[in-house]
Protein backbone atom coordinates (compact mmCIF):
# COMPACT_ATOMS: atom_id res chain seq x y z
CA UNK A 1 0.00 0.00 0.00
CA UNK A 2 2.81 2.37 0.86
CA UNK A 3 4.55 1.57 -2.43
CA UNK A 4 1.35 2.33 -4.36
CA UNK A 5 1.06 5.72 -2.64
CA UNK A 6 4.70 6.42 -3.49
CA UNK A 7 4.04 5.66 -7.16
CA UNK A 8 1.03 7.95 -7.21
CA UNK A 9 3.04 10.71 -5.58
CA UNK A 10 5.82 10.19 -8.10
CA UNK A 11 3.40 10.56 -11.01
CA UNK A 12 2.01 13.76 -9.52
CA UNK A 13 5.47 15.26 -9.10
CA UNK A 14 6.42 14.20 -12.61
CA UNK A 15 3.30 15.91 -13.92
CA UNK A 16 4.29 19.09 -12.12
CA UNK A 17 7.75 18.99 -13.64
CA UNK A 18 6.38 18.31 -17.12
CA UNK A 19 3.82 21.10 -16.83
CA UNK A 20 6.15 23.65 -15.30
CA UNK A 21 6.26 25.56 -18.60
CA UNK A 22 2.47 25.53 -18.83
CA UNK A 23 1.09 29.07 -18.85
CA UNK A 24 -1.97 28.06 -16.83
CA UNK A 25 0.17 26.52 -14.08
CA UNK A 26 2.35 29.64 -13.93
CA UNK A 27 -0.80 31.75 -13.74
CA UNK A 28 -2.10 29.60 -10.87
CA UNK A 29 1.19 29.93 -8.95
CA UNK A 30 1.19 33.71 -9.33
CA UNK A 31 -2.48 33.78 -8.34
CA UNK A 32 -1.78 31.87 -5.11
CA UNK A 33 1.30 33.97 -4.33
CA UNK A 34 -0.66 37.23 -4.66
CA UNK A 35 -3.54 35.72 -2.68
CA UNK A 36 -1.34 34.88 0.32
CA UNK A 37 0.57 38.15 0.14
CA UNK A 38 -2.59 40.22 0.27
CA UNK A 39 -4.29 38.04 2.85
CA UNK A 40 -1.35 38.74 5.16
CA UNK A 41 -1.51 42.40 4.10
CA UNK A 42 -5.15 42.81 5.09
CA UNK A 43 -5.68 40.24 7.85
CA UNK A 44 -3.97 42.63 10.26
CA UNK A 45 -6.31 45.53 9.40
CA UNK A 46 -8.99 44.66 12.00
CA UNK A 47 -6.53 43.06 14.44
CA UNK A 48 -3.76 45.64 14.89
CA UNK A 49 -5.81 48.74 15.92
CA UNK A 50 -7.78 46.83 18.55
CA UNK A 51 -4.75 44.83 19.72
CA UNK A 52 -2.49 47.88 20.11
CA UNK A 53 -5.29 49.78 21.86
CA UNK A 54 -5.71 46.96 24.38
CA UNK A 55 -1.94 46.84 24.94
CA UNK A 56 -1.78 50.59 25.57
CA UNK A 57 -4.77 50.63 27.91
CA UNK A 58 -3.47 47.62 29.83
CA UNK A 59 -0.04 49.22 30.18
CA UNK A 60 -1.64 52.46 31.38
CA UNK A 61 -3.73 50.57 33.94
CA UNK A 62 -0.70 48.74 35.30
CA UNK A 63 1.30 51.98 35.49
CA UNK A 64 -1.57 53.70 37.30
CA UNK A 65 -1.85 50.85 39.79
CA UNK A 66 1.88 50.92 40.47
CA UNK A 67 1.80 54.65 41.18
CA UNK A 68 -1.11 54.18 43.58
CA UNK A 69 0.73 51.44 45.44
CA UNK A 70 3.80 53.66 45.84
CA UNK A 71 1.79 56.48 47.44
CA UNK A 72 -0.59 54.33 49.49
CA UNK A 73 0.35 53.36 53.11
CA UNK A 74 -1.49 50.10 52.64
CA UNK A 75 0.45 48.43 49.91
CA UNK A 76 -0.72 44.86 50.59
CA UNK A 77 -4.17 43.40 50.19
CA UNK A 78 -3.62 40.81 52.94
CA UNK A 79 -1.40 40.44 56.04
CA UNK A 80 -0.44 37.09 57.56
CA UNK A 81 -0.30 37.20 61.37
CA UNK A 82 2.56 35.15 62.82
CA UNK A 83 0.91 35.33 66.25
CA UNK A 84 -2.16 33.22 65.55
CA UNK A 85 -1.57 32.12 61.93
CA UNK A 86 -4.57 34.03 60.65
CA UNK A 87 -4.89 36.04 57.46
CA UNK A 88 -6.22 39.55 57.90
CA UNK A 89 -7.28 42.12 55.31
CA UNK A 90 -5.21 45.30 55.11
CA UNK A 91 -8.47 47.27 55.00
CA UNK A 92 -9.81 45.86 58.26
CA UNK A 93 -8.01 45.14 61.57
CA UNK A 94 -9.83 42.41 63.51
CA UNK A 95 -7.91 43.14 66.74
CA UNK A 96 -8.37 46.90 66.62
CA UNK A 97 -9.85 48.31 69.82
CA UNK A 98 -11.29 51.41 68.14
CA UNK A 99 -13.85 51.27 65.37
CA UNK A 100 -12.81 54.73 64.28
CA UNK A 101 -9.42 53.55 63.06
CA UNK A 102 -8.77 54.51 59.48
CA UNK A 103 -9.25 51.86 56.83
CA UNK A 104 -6.89 51.57 53.87
CA UNK A 105 -7.96 49.44 50.96
CA UNK A 106 -5.78 48.99 47.89
CA UNK A 107 -7.55 49.79 44.66
CA UNK A 108 -8.41 46.65 42.73
CA UNK A 109 -6.45 46.10 39.56
CA UNK A 110 -8.59 45.00 36.64
CA UNK A 111 -7.15 45.04 33.17
CA UNK A 112 -9.69 45.99 30.53
CA UNK A 113 -10.79 43.21 28.27
CA UNK A 114 -9.81 43.42 24.62
CA UNK A 115 -13.06 44.85 23.34
CA UNK A 116 -13.85 47.52 20.78
CA UNK A 117 -17.29 48.37 22.22
CA UNK A 118 -17.29 52.03 23.29
CA UNK A 119 -13.57 52.48 24.13
CA UNK A 120 -12.71 53.82 27.55
CA UNK A 121 -10.54 56.69 26.36
CA UNK A 122 -11.28 58.62 23.19
CA UNK A 123 -7.97 60.46 23.49
CA UNK A 124 -6.00 57.24 23.58
CA UNK A 125 -7.98 55.99 20.60
CA UNK A 126 -7.22 59.07 18.48
CA UNK A 127 -3.51 58.75 19.32
CA UNK A 128 -3.56 55.22 17.87
CA UNK A 129 -3.94 56.70 14.36
CA UNK A 130 -0.26 57.57 14.05
CA UNK A 131 1.05 54.31 15.52
CA UNK A 132 -1.22 52.16 13.40
CA UNK A 133 -0.52 54.24 10.30
CA UNK A 134 3.26 53.93 10.67
CA UNK A 135 2.98 50.20 11.29
CA UNK A 136 0.85 49.65 8.18
CA UNK A 137 3.09 51.92 6.09
CA UNK A 138 6.31 50.12 7.10
CA UNK A 139 5.59 47.20 4.74
CA UNK A 140 5.02 49.41 1.72
CA UNK A 141 7.98 51.64 2.60
CA UNK A 142 10.41 48.71 2.71
CA UNK A 143 8.88 47.27 -0.46
CA UNK A 144 9.32 50.67 -2.09
CA UNK A 145 13.05 50.62 -1.33
CA UNK A 146 13.56 47.00 -2.42
CA UNK A 147 11.65 47.09 -5.73
CA UNK A 148 14.28 49.02 -7.76
CA UNK A 149 16.74 46.21 -7.05
CA UNK A 150 14.34 43.30 -7.68
CA UNK A 151 13.37 44.45 -11.19
CA UNK A 152 16.89 44.43 -12.69
CA UNK A 153 17.68 41.27 -10.68
CA UNK A 154 14.91 39.35 -12.43
CA UNK A 155 16.38 40.41 -15.78
CA UNK A 156 19.66 38.76 -14.80
CA UNK A 157 18.61 35.57 -12.99
CA UNK A 158 15.03 35.05 -14.15
CA UNK A 159 11.73 35.05 -12.26
CA UNK A 160 11.68 31.62 -10.58
CA UNK A 161 14.28 32.19 -7.89
CA UNK A 162 13.05 35.64 -6.73
CA UNK A 163 9.44 34.46 -6.39
CA UNK A 164 10.59 31.48 -4.28
CA UNK A 165 12.76 33.70 -2.09
CA UNK A 166 9.70 35.88 -1.63
CA UNK A 167 7.76 32.87 -0.35
CA UNK A 168 10.46 32.03 2.22
CA UNK A 169 10.50 35.59 3.56
CA UNK A 170 6.69 35.79 3.65
CA UNK A 171 6.53 32.56 5.65
CA UNK A 172 9.01 33.93 8.21
CA UNK A 173 7.02 37.16 8.49
CA UNK A 174 3.77 35.25 9.05
CA UNK A 175 5.26 33.20 11.89
CA UNK A 176 6.66 36.36 13.44
CA UNK A 177 3.24 38.02 13.31
CA UNK A 178 1.70 35.05 15.08
CA UNK A 179 3.96 35.22 18.13
CA UNK A 180 4.80 38.94 18.40
CA UNK A 181 3.38 40.64 21.47
CA UNK A 182 4.90 44.12 21.25
CA UNK A 183 4.72 47.04 18.85
CA UNK A 184 8.41 46.75 17.94
CA UNK A 185 8.18 43.08 16.91
CA UNK A 186 5.00 43.69 14.94
CA UNK A 187 6.78 46.55 13.16
CA UNK A 188 9.69 44.27 12.23
CA UNK A 189 7.31 41.55 10.99
CA UNK A 190 5.41 44.05 8.84
CA UNK A 191 8.66 45.43 7.39
CA UNK A 192 9.95 41.92 6.64
CA UNK A 193 6.75 41.24 4.76
CA UNK A 194 7.63 44.11 2.45
CA UNK A 195 10.81 42.36 1.29
CA UNK A 196 8.97 39.13 0.51
CA UNK A 197 6.11 40.93 -1.19
CA UNK A 198 8.52 42.80 -3.44
CA UNK A 199 10.06 39.55 -4.66
CA UNK A 200 6.71 37.83 -5.19
CA UNK A 201 4.80 40.62 -6.93
CA UNK A 202 7.54 41.89 -9.26
CA UNK A 203 8.68 38.42 -10.30
CA UNK A 204 5.11 37.14 -10.60
CA UNK A 205 3.85 39.95 -12.83
CA UNK A 206 7.00 39.85 -14.94
CA UNK A 207 6.64 36.10 -15.38
CA UNK A 208 3.06 36.48 -16.60
CA UNK A 209 3.98 39.26 -19.04
CA UNK A 210 6.78 37.11 -20.47
CA UNK A 211 4.63 34.00 -21.09
CA UNK A 212 1.50 35.85 -22.29
CA UNK A 213 2.85 37.81 -25.24
CA UNK A 214 -0.49 38.64 -26.89
CA UNK A 215 -1.83 41.90 -25.48
CA UNK A 216 -5.43 40.73 -25.08
CA UNK A 217 -4.39 37.42 -23.50
CA UNK A 218 -2.00 39.26 -21.21
CA UNK A 219 -4.75 41.60 -20.05
CA UNK A 220 -7.01 38.64 -19.29
CA UNK A 221 -4.23 36.75 -17.46
CA UNK A 222 -3.23 39.77 -15.39
CA UNK A 223 -6.90 40.29 -14.58
CA UNK A 224 -7.08 36.73 -13.24
CA UNK A 225 -3.87 37.21 -11.25
CA UNK A 226 -5.24 40.42 -9.79
CA UNK A 227 -8.24 38.32 -8.84
CA UNK A 228 -5.90 36.52 -6.45
CA UNK A 229 -4.93 39.89 -5.03
CA UNK A 230 -8.62 40.75 -4.78
CA UNK A 231 -9.47 37.49 -3.03
CA UNK A 232 -6.70 38.14 -0.52
CA UNK A 233 -8.11 41.60 0.11
CA UNK A 234 -11.59 40.08 0.23
CA UNK A 235 -10.91 37.26 2.68
CA UNK A 236 -8.27 38.96 4.84
CA UNK A 237 -10.22 41.49 6.95
CA UNK A 238 -13.30 39.35 7.80
CA UNK A 239 -11.14 36.26 8.32
CA UNK A 240 -8.82 38.19 10.66
CA UNK A 241 -11.61 39.85 12.62
CA UNK A 242 -13.64 36.66 13.16
CA UNK A 243 -10.60 34.58 14.13
CA UNK A 244 -9.34 37.33 16.45
CA UNK A 245 -12.74 37.66 18.10
CA UNK A 246 -13.40 33.98 18.72
CA UNK A 247 -9.99 32.22 18.64
CA UNK A 248 -7.23 34.76 19.27
CA UNK A 249 -4.48 36.72 17.54
CA UNK A 250 -2.20 33.78 16.78
CA UNK A 251 -4.68 31.53 14.94
CA UNK A 252 -5.15 33.45 11.64
CA UNK A 253 -1.41 33.80 11.09
CA UNK A 254 -0.74 30.11 11.71
CA UNK A 255 -3.39 29.20 9.12
CA UNK A 256 -1.77 31.57 6.62
CA UNK A 257 1.62 30.00 7.35
CA UNK A 258 0.20 26.56 6.53
CA UNK A 259 -1.19 27.85 3.22
CA UNK A 260 2.16 29.48 2.45
CA UNK A 261 3.87 26.10 2.82
CA UNK A 262 1.55 24.68 0.17
CA UNK A 263 2.44 27.50 -2.22
CA UNK A 264 6.15 27.05 -1.53
CA UNK A 265 5.98 23.31 -2.23
CA UNK A 266 4.14 24.01 -5.49
CA UNK A 267 6.80 26.50 -6.56
CA UNK A 268 9.61 24.14 -5.58
CA UNK A 269 8.38 21.24 -7.69
CA UNK A 270 6.86 23.16 -10.60
CA UNK A 271 9.20 26.12 -11.16
CA UNK A 272 12.47 24.52 -10.02
CA UNK A 273 13.74 27.79 -8.53
CA UNK A 274 17.31 26.50 -8.18
CA UNK A 275 17.89 27.18 -11.88
CA UNK A 276 19.05 30.61 -13.05
CA UNK A 277 17.37 31.60 -16.33
CA UNK A 278 18.35 35.13 -17.38
CA UNK A 279 16.47 37.02 -20.08
CA UNK A 280 17.67 36.50 -23.65
CA UNK A 281 17.98 40.25 -24.27
CA UNK A 282 19.05 43.18 -22.17
CA UNK A 283 16.14 45.17 -20.81
CA UNK A 284 15.67 48.94 -20.89
CA UNK A 285 17.41 50.62 -17.92
CA UNK A 286 15.16 51.38 -14.98
CA UNK A 287 15.87 55.12 -15.06
CA UNK A 288 14.91 55.29 -18.73
CA UNK A 289 11.58 53.67 -17.98
CA UNK A 290 11.01 56.02 -15.06
CA UNK A 291 11.47 59.02 -17.39
CA UNK A 292 8.80 57.78 -19.78
CA UNK A 293 5.82 60.13 -19.24
CA UNK A 294 3.24 57.51 -20.24
CA UNK A 295 4.60 54.98 -17.77
CA UNK A 296 4.55 57.73 -15.13
CA UNK A 297 0.87 58.48 -15.82
CA UNK A 298 -0.06 54.80 -15.57
CA UNK A 299 1.98 54.50 -12.36
CA UNK A 300 0.32 57.61 -10.92
CA UNK A 301 -3.13 56.14 -11.52
CA UNK A 302 -2.12 52.96 -9.68
CA UNK A 303 -0.60 54.99 -6.83
CA UNK A 304 -3.42 57.46 -6.17
CA UNK A 305 -6.17 54.92 -6.79
CA UNK A 306 -4.81 52.53 -4.19
CA UNK A 307 -3.89 55.34 -1.81
CA UNK A 308 -7.60 55.80 -1.11
CA UNK A 309 -8.06 52.29 0.30
CA UNK A 310 -4.64 52.53 1.96
CA UNK A 311 -5.83 55.55 3.94
CA UNK A 312 -9.03 53.75 4.88
CA UNK A 313 -7.29 50.68 6.31
CA UNK A 314 -5.74 52.22 9.46
CA UNK A 315 -8.22 55.06 9.99
CA UNK A 316 -11.65 53.54 9.27
CA UNK A 317 -11.53 50.95 12.12
CA UNK A 318 -10.50 53.65 14.61
CA UNK A 319 -13.21 56.01 13.33
CA UNK A 320 -15.76 53.20 13.65
CA UNK A 321 -14.65 52.46 17.22
CA UNK A 322 -14.94 56.15 18.05
CA UNK A 323 -18.27 56.98 16.39
CA UNK A 324 -20.13 53.65 16.14
CA UNK A 325 -18.81 51.71 19.15
CA UNK A 326 -18.08 48.95 16.63
CA UNK A 327 -17.34 45.43 17.80
CA UNK A 328 -14.11 43.70 16.78
CA UNK A 329 -15.68 41.48 14.14
CA UNK A 330 -17.30 44.53 12.52
CA UNK A 331 -13.93 46.22 12.00
CA UNK A 332 -13.00 43.64 9.36
CA UNK A 333 -16.46 43.05 7.93
CA UNK A 334 -16.66 46.76 7.06
CA UNK A 335 -14.10 46.12 4.29
CA UNK A 336 -16.04 43.17 2.87
CA UNK A 337 -18.07 45.19 0.29
CA UNK A 338 -14.88 46.83 -1.02
CA UNK A 339 -13.15 43.47 -1.30
CA UNK A 340 -16.05 41.81 -3.14
CA UNK A 341 -16.42 44.71 -5.55
CA UNK A 342 -12.65 44.80 -6.20
CA UNK A 343 -12.82 41.13 -7.18
CA UNK A 344 -15.71 41.88 -9.52
CA UNK A 345 -14.00 44.94 -10.96
CA UNK A 346 -10.74 43.18 -11.81
CA UNK A 347 -12.59 40.21 -13.32
CA UNK A 348 -14.99 42.25 -15.44
CA UNK A 349 -12.60 44.94 -16.65
CA UNK A 350 -9.69 42.55 -17.24
CA UNK A 351 -11.48 41.83 -20.53
CA UNK A 352 -13.92 44.73 -20.90
CA UNK A 353 -11.22 47.41 -20.60
CA UNK A 354 -9.60 46.02 -23.75
CA UNK A 355 -12.80 46.72 -25.69
CA UNK A 356 -13.78 50.13 -24.35
CA UNK A 357 -10.24 51.42 -23.99
CA UNK A 358 -8.08 50.99 -20.93
CA UNK A 359 -7.48 54.72 -20.65
CA UNK A 360 -11.26 55.31 -20.43
CA UNK A 361 -11.70 52.53 -17.87
CA UNK A 362 -8.96 54.03 -15.68
CA UNK A 363 -10.35 57.57 -16.05
CA UNK A 364 -13.85 56.55 -14.97
CA UNK A 365 -12.39 54.47 -12.16
CA UNK A 366 -10.37 57.36 -10.74
CA UNK A 367 -13.41 59.67 -10.71
CA UNK A 368 -15.53 56.96 -9.08
CA UNK A 369 -12.88 56.37 -6.39
CA UNK A 370 -12.87 60.06 -5.50
CA UNK A 371 -16.66 60.32 -5.27
CA UNK A 372 -17.03 57.17 -3.17
CA UNK A 373 -14.34 57.94 -0.56
CA UNK A 374 -15.80 61.41 -0.04
CA UNK A 375 -19.07 59.69 0.83
CA UNK A 376 -17.58 57.33 3.46
CA UNK A 377 -17.74 59.76 6.45
CA UNK A 378 -21.47 60.33 5.89
CA UNK A 379 -22.19 56.79 7.13
CA UNK A 380 -23.70 56.59 10.60
CA UNK A 381 -23.66 52.80 10.96
CA UNK A 382 -21.86 49.83 9.49
CA UNK A 383 -24.72 49.44 7.01
CA UNK A 384 -24.17 52.97 5.76
CA UNK A 385 -20.63 52.01 4.78
CA UNK A 386 -21.75 49.34 2.31
CA UNK A 387 -22.43 51.56 -0.72
CA UNK A 388 -19.36 53.88 -0.59
CA UNK A 389 -16.91 51.07 0.20
CA UNK A 390 -18.44 48.87 -2.52
CA UNK A 391 -18.02 51.65 -5.05
CA UNK A 392 -14.46 52.33 -3.91
CA UNK A 393 -13.38 48.72 -4.32
CA UNK A 394 -15.05 48.37 -7.74
CA UNK A 395 -13.42 51.56 -9.00
CA UNK A 396 -9.94 50.54 -7.82
CA UNK A 397 -10.48 47.22 -9.60
CA UNK A 398 -11.19 49.17 -12.80
CA UNK A 399 -7.96 51.14 -12.41
CA UNK A 400 -5.69 48.20 -11.55
CA UNK A 401 -7.02 45.83 -14.23
CA UNK A 402 -6.52 48.58 -16.83
CA UNK A 403 -3.16 50.02 -15.82
CA UNK A 404 -1.25 46.79 -15.10
CA UNK A 405 -1.59 45.48 -18.68
CA UNK A 406 -0.84 48.95 -20.07
CA UNK A 407 2.52 48.88 -18.28
CA UNK A 408 3.52 45.75 -20.20
CA UNK A 409 2.13 47.08 -23.46
CA UNK A 410 4.02 50.38 -23.15
CA UNK A 411 7.25 48.43 -22.80
CA UNK A 412 6.40 46.40 -25.90
CA UNK A 413 5.51 49.57 -27.79
CA UNK A 414 8.26 51.96 -26.73
CA UNK A 415 11.10 49.91 -25.20
CA UNK A 416 12.63 46.42 -25.04
CA UNK A 417 10.15 43.64 -24.18
CA UNK A 418 11.70 42.71 -20.83
CA UNK A 419 9.20 43.20 -18.04
CA UNK A 420 10.95 42.92 -14.68
CA UNK A 421 11.83 46.60 -14.41
CA UNK A 422 8.50 48.00 -15.59
CA UNK A 423 6.55 45.88 -13.13
CA UNK A 424 8.99 46.93 -10.45
CA UNK A 425 7.88 50.49 -11.27
CA UNK A 426 4.24 49.42 -11.12
CA UNK A 427 4.83 47.82 -7.75
CA UNK A 428 6.68 50.94 -6.57
CA UNK A 429 3.61 52.98 -7.48
CA UNK A 430 1.38 50.53 -5.63
CA UNK A 431 3.69 50.66 -2.61
CA UNK A 432 3.86 54.45 -2.62
CA UNK A 433 0.11 54.47 -2.25
CA UNK A 434 0.25 52.05 0.64
CA UNK A 435 3.25 53.78 2.23
CA UNK A 436 2.13 57.40 2.02
CA UNK A 437 -1.54 56.54 2.57
CA UNK A 438 -1.37 55.09 6.10
CA UNK A 439 1.49 57.27 7.35
CA UNK A 440 0.12 60.59 6.08
CA UNK A 441 -3.48 59.52 6.55
CA UNK A 442 -3.00 58.67 10.21
CA UNK A 443 -1.47 62.06 10.94
CA UNK A 444 -4.14 63.95 9.00
CA UNK A 445 -6.94 62.01 10.71
CA UNK A 446 -5.45 62.84 14.10
CA UNK A 447 -5.00 66.54 13.24
CA UNK A 448 -8.08 67.59 11.27
CA UNK A 449 -10.30 64.52 11.43
CA UNK A 450 -11.31 61.51 9.36
CA UNK A 451 -13.92 63.30 7.17
CA UNK A 452 -11.40 65.87 5.94
CA UNK A 453 -8.91 63.08 5.18
CA UNK A 454 -11.43 61.36 2.90
CA UNK A 455 -12.27 64.64 1.20
CA UNK A 456 -8.60 65.38 0.45
CA UNK A 457 -7.80 62.01 -1.14
CA UNK A 458 -11.10 62.05 -3.05
CA UNK A 459 -10.35 65.44 -4.60
CA UNK A 460 -6.81 64.33 -5.50
CA UNK A 461 -8.14 61.28 -7.38
CA UNK A 462 -10.71 63.35 -9.28
CA UNK A 463 -8.05 65.92 -10.28
CA UNK A 464 -5.66 63.22 -11.49
CA UNK A 465 -8.29 61.37 -13.58
CA UNK A 466 -8.07 63.53 -16.77
CA UNK A 467 -4.38 62.62 -17.16
CA UNK A 468 -5.47 59.11 -18.16
CA UNK A 469 -6.66 60.64 -21.46
CA UNK A 470 -3.02 60.85 -22.58
CA UNK A 471 -2.84 57.05 -22.56
CA UNK A 472 -5.38 57.01 -25.40
CA UNK A 473 -2.71 57.45 -28.09
CA UNK A 474 0.81 56.75 -26.76
CA UNK A 475 3.49 57.08 -29.46
CA UNK A 476 5.52 54.01 -30.30
CA UNK A 477 8.59 53.25 -32.37
CA UNK A 478 7.78 52.31 -35.96
CA UNK A 479 9.48 48.92 -35.90
CA UNK A 480 7.84 48.05 -32.58
CA UNK A 481 4.36 48.89 -33.90
CA UNK A 482 4.96 46.60 -36.88
CA UNK A 483 5.55 43.72 -34.48
CA UNK A 484 2.36 44.50 -32.57
CA UNK A 485 0.20 44.91 -35.70
CA UNK A 486 -1.53 41.56 -35.27
CA UNK A 487 -2.41 42.06 -31.60
CA UNK A 488 -5.87 43.37 -30.72
CA UNK A 489 -5.00 46.45 -28.67
CA UNK A 490 -7.43 48.86 -27.09
CA UNK A 491 -5.13 51.86 -27.45
CA UNK A 492 -4.40 54.23 -30.32
CA UNK A 493 -0.74 54.75 -31.12
CA UNK A 494 1.29 57.33 -32.98
CA UNK A 495 4.44 56.14 -34.68
CA UNK A 496 7.73 57.95 -34.90
CA UNK A 497 11.01 57.09 -36.55
CA UNK A 498 14.19 56.38 -34.63
CA UNK A 499 15.40 59.86 -35.62
CA UNK A 500 12.40 61.38 -33.80
CA UNK A 501 10.36 62.59 -36.83
CA UNK A 502 6.79 61.42 -37.20
CA UNK A 503 6.27 59.03 -40.12
CA UNK A 504 2.81 57.51 -40.60
CA UNK A 505 2.65 54.09 -42.21
CA UNK A 506 1.16 53.48 -45.63
CA UNK A 507 -2.51 52.71 -45.88
CA UNK A 508 -3.28 54.01 -42.43
CA UNK A 509 -4.60 57.16 -40.80
CA UNK A 510 -1.83 59.79 -40.96
CA UNK A 511 -2.33 60.66 -37.31
CA UNK A 512 -3.40 57.54 -35.46
CA UNK A 513 -3.55 53.77 -35.78
CA UNK A 514 -6.67 52.49 -34.09
CA UNK A 515 -6.40 48.84 -33.20
CA UNK A 516 -10.04 48.71 -32.19
Image: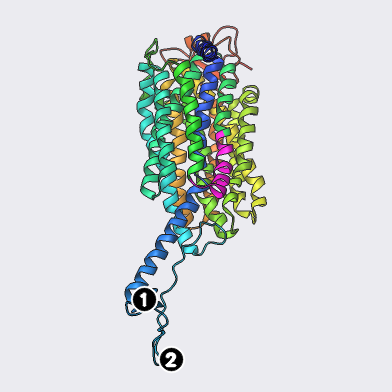
Res. 80 image quadrant: bottom left
365, 499: nearer the viewer = 365
Q: Residues within 10 Å of mark 2 (few under 14, many from 20)?
A: few
Residue 243 inside the magenta-drawn segment: yes
Residue underneath mark 1: 85
Residue underneath mark 2: 99
The image's mark for residue 499 is none
Q: Residue at x 42, y 58 (%)?
A: 56
Q: Residues within 10 Å of mark 1 (few under 14, many from 20)?
A: few
Say if residue 197 shows up in the picture.
yes
Magenta region's main secondary structure? Answer: helix
Q: Quadrant of the C terminus?
A: top right
342, 10: nearer the viewer = 10
Res. 419 image quadrant: top left
Q: Quadrant of the N terminus?
A: top right
Q: Is residue 355 left or right of residue 16?
A: right
Q: Residue 18: where, in percent of width, then height?
A: 51, 9
Q: Residue 238: where, in percent of width, then height?
A: 59, 43
Mark 1, secondary structure of its residue: loop
Q: Is residue 81 left or right of residue 33?
A: left
In this rendering, the count of numbered labels is: 2
Mark 2, secondary structure of its residue: loop
Amino acid sequence: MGRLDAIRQFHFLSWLREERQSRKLILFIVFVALLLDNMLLTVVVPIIPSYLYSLDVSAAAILNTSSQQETSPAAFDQIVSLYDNTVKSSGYNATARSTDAPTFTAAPTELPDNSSDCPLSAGTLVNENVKVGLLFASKATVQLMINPFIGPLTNRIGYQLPIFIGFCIMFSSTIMFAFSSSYALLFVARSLQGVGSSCSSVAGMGMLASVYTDDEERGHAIGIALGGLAMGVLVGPPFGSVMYEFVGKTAPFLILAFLALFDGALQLFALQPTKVEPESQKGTPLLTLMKDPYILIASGAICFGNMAIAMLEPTLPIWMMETMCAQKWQLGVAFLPASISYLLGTYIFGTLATKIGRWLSALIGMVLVGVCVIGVPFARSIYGLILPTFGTGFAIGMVDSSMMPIMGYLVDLRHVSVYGSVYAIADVAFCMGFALGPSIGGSIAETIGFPWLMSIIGIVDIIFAPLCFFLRNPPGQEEKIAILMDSNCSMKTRSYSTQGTCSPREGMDPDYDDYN
